[in-house]
């Protein structure tokens, strides 16, 4: 018996979108239909480059028409299959909600919470959201959407932290670097110093390591664009350099670390080993830092040593597992290993409600259980005692709050801001570490500590 030919679902989605473009429904003006068509094609193109499934590609083409009530999700399912229908329906009802903060923090923070929750709900829903936000970023970067500075708030407060949660650092670095360049007054000077520092590192390592195994990253520039940090940290960033060193195996990673410490003066207390279990976003490697003398100026070089497969996950996070190369990796500390439990916690109460036991998000998208009325100081000490001692400020939904501010609302975004040079909290507040009023799981606390290390 001959098998039926495989249906090209993305092509079916494109044909359906073209019909809606050519003959818009009464709810959709022709110009709006043309715009939805172009955006859908662009979103699907991003997803295709990342290796998305046919169902997700179809949803990328059609989601805008479903969102604007020009197409029923059921009809999308009839043409492109039930999974495409499900993704379109999830996007419309989960991420297209009107965000009313109700006086609680900033609306961008509430949008970020919606996107964090979507990632727990369905990885493909999260990837669709990323592709939509990524197209908006590219439009801003190219000038197609008007003045680039108007995009900075969305990039800083939504896209960059969402990419960080998903572990998609290959894209996050591009967003952060563009935002920094948009705000920095002396880009040429800073980047020239960075290039000289990188050239010096390559020259020092070239006798023992292939040049293509030495790669530059831009992790630290994200601190200049963090939604709760001070702006304009270029003076700090220009004295930092992020470098990845690739090795063929875990054993070779440790051997490479030995030669790094022979070639550079390591900084005390800057080493961490996440080669085996990884961090909350899936990042693995041997992490060490060293000082580099550059014409009398000290530059801090942050090294990460890992294998090529590890670097694929370091750069693409969850997308490396569900798209692209679809790798299989045991990452016990990654947040997505508890996605099912997280979905139940998110659904335990409506967002913004006042239950006795509630869950709040960390800036990295990790969920913590707290009792209503415990303070942000309680939360900070439960997450990581040592880092809590270095807190200089606390934010709830991107708004600065007092250390004794109680937590009341389900799915708030709680962010202690750390400063390694801070003298510590007031003694009366520091005593709260022993009150035991926060009951988050110990495993969550340990993972958050590893992620912050």
Image: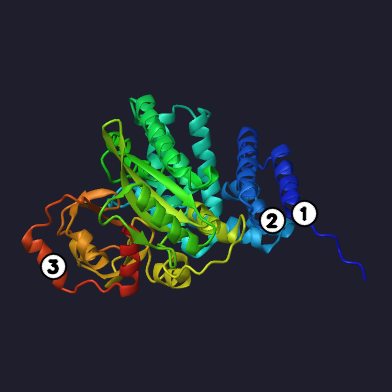
Q: Residue at x 40, y 36 (%)?
A: 200
How far is the residue under mark 2 from the one under mark 1?
Answer: 8 Å
How far is the residue under mark 2 from the one under mark 3?
Answer: 52 Å
- Residue of label 3: 432
How far is the residue under mark 3 from the one under mark 1?
Answer: 60 Å
Residue 168, given in percent of the width and then of the height, sits at 49, 51
User: Which of the marked residues, 2 or 3, is nearer the chain's N terminus?
Assistant: 2
Query: Which residue of the protein is positioned furthest toward the right in this rendering?
Result: 1
In the rendered view, would you say 387 is above or below 349?
A: above
Verify CB contact (< 8 Å) between mark 3 and mark 1: no
In the rendered view, would you say 147 is above or below 374?
A: above
Query: In the image, which is nearer the foreground, mark 3 or mark 1?
Result: 3
- Residue of label 1: 8
In the rendered view, would you say 406 is above or below 110?
A: below
Q: Which mark is residue 134?
A: none
Q: Which mark is residue 54?
A: 2
Residue 20, given in percent of the width and then of the height, sits at 70, 43
User: Which of the marked residues, 3 or 1, is nearer the chain's N terminus?
Assistant: 1
In this orientation, which residue lies closer to the viewer: 393 or 90?
393
Quadrant of the image for the N terminus? bottom right
């Amino acid at each position: 018996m001959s098998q039926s030919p495989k249906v090209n679902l993305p092509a079916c989605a494109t044909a359906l979108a073209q019909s809606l473009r050519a003959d818009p429904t009464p709810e959709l003006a022709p110009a709006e239909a043309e715009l939805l068509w172009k955006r859908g094609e662009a979103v699907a193109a991003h997803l295709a480059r990342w290796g998305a499934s046919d169902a997700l590609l179809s949803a990328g083409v059609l989601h805008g028409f479903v969102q604007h009530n020009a197409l029923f999700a059921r009809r999308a399912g009839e043409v492109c299959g039930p999974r495409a229908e499900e993704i379109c329906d999830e996007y419309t009802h989960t991420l297209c909600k009107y965000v009313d903060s109700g006086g609680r923090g900033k609306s961008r923070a509430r949008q970020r919470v919606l996107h964090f929750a979507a990632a727990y709900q369905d990885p493909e829903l999260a990837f669709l959201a990323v592709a939509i936000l990524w197209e908006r970023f590219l439009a801003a970067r190219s000038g197609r959407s008007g003045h680039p500075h108007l995009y900075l708030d969305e990039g800083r407060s939504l896209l960059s932290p969402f990419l960080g949660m998903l572990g998609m650092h290959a894209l996050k670095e591009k967003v952060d670097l563009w935002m920094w360049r948009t705000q920095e007054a002396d880009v040429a000077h800073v980047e020239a110093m960075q290039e000289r520092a990188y050239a010096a590192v390559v020259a020092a390592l070239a006798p023992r390591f292939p040049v293509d195994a030495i790669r530059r990253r831009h992790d630290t520039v994200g601190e200049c664009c963090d939604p709760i940090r001070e702006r304009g940290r270029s003076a700090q960033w220009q004295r930092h350099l992020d470098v990845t060193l690739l090795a063929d195996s875990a054993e070779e990673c440790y051997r490479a670390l030995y030669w790094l410490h022979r070639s550079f003066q390591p900084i005390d207390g800057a080493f961490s080993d996440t080669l085996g279990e990884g961090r909350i976003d899936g990042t693995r490697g041997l992490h060490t830092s060293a000082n580099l003398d550059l014409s009398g100026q000290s530059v801090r070089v942050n090294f990460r040593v890992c294998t090529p497969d590890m670097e694929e996950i370091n750069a693409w996070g969850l997308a490396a597992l569900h798209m692209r190369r679809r790798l299989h990796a045991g990452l016990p500390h990654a947040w997505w290993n508890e996605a099912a439990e997280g979905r139940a916690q998110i659904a335990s109460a409506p967002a913004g409600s006042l239950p006795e036991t509630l869950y709040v998000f960390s800036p990295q998208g990790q969920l913590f259980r707290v009792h209503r009325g415990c303070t942000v100081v309680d939360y900070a000490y439960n997450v990581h005692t040592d880092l809590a001692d270095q807190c200089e400020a606390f934010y709830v939904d991107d708004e600065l709050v007092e250390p004794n501010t109680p937590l009341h609302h389900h799915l708030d975004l709680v962010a202690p801001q750390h400063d390694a040079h801070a003298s510590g909290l007031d003694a009366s507040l520091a005593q709260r570490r022993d009150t035991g009023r926060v009951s988050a799981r110990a495993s969550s606390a340990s993972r958050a500590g590893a992620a912050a290390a």
